[in-house]
Amino acid sequence: KAGVTQTPRYLIKTRGQQVTLSCSPISGHRSVSWYQQTPGQGLQFLFEYFSETQRNKGNFPGRFSGRQFSNSRSEMNVSTLELGDSALYLCASSLDIYQPQHFGDGTRLSIL
Amino acid sequence: GENVEQHPSTLSVQEGDSAVIKCTYSDSASNYFPWYKQELGKGPQLIIDIRSNVGEKKDQRIAVTLNKTAKHFSLHITETQPEDSAVYFCAASTGGNQFYFGTGTSLTVIP
């Protein structure tokens, strides 16, 4: 069974630009969550989507948004990029709540 | 919200010895506690998890214990091997798929 796939693996952007990251969950998984990982703040929850609806949201500004498609694939968008947005963005999928989450290898976003 | 603390931040053990990583959580409503292993350049990999209605769970060389009264849970790795070297994260969830992670433990197994 294929794991969680995130594209692209690496991305370089400049301040003020916007970016879209993609996540394909494990087949059959309907829940997709996004996390930001930085050396200073660790792993922080961004949001979770289930059946195309945002079910949970972390404490991030509105510049961070996401969506989920009918095939459970998800995208995350960050607008007006700031230097502090440089991080590893991880996507995790699961069948539903109380089920193990499986992570992809992330998208490394660097802001210049 | 939930706050998860993890100790130690770094841990070095000789090959064959045991390693123990401890986490505490603040929200008594937390009921699901997974542990992840993250290798360089990779995403976190689930290695074991435990639910609040269970006190201990074991999977070969890995075990997790949970003390709900004290609000802490621990990861135990026995007979450590060099390939166990990685960063380990604990996490807690009060429900849903919003997880709160510890700050990580960098484990080095010395051959």
Image: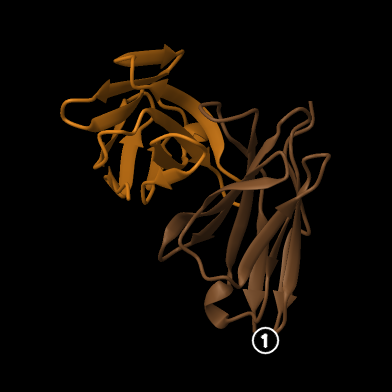
Among the 4 quarters of the image, the one containing residue A70: top right
* Image x and y of residue A76, in percent: 70, 60
Badge 1 is on which residue? A16
Q: Residue at x 48, y 33 (%)?
A: B84
- Chain coloured brown here: A
The image shows residue A52 at horizontal and vertical percentages of: 73, 45
In screen coordinates, is B87 left or right of A93? left
Give the crowd class for mark 1: few <14, some 14-19, many >=20 residues within 10 Å: few
- Residue at figure coordinates x 31%, y 50% from the top left: B9
Image quarter for residue B105? top left
Identify which amino acid the numbered label 1 is placed on.
Answer: Gly
- Say left or right for A45 vs A109: left
What chain is colored orange?
B
- Of all residues shown, which one is farthest toward the right? A71
Pick whichever, B73 or B81, lies toward us: B73
Q: Quadrant of the C terminus of chain B?
A: top left
Asked if residue A21 is positioned above or below residue A25 in the image, the reply reads: below
What residue sits 61% from the left and 29% below the top?
A96
In the figure, B12 relative to B81: above or below? below
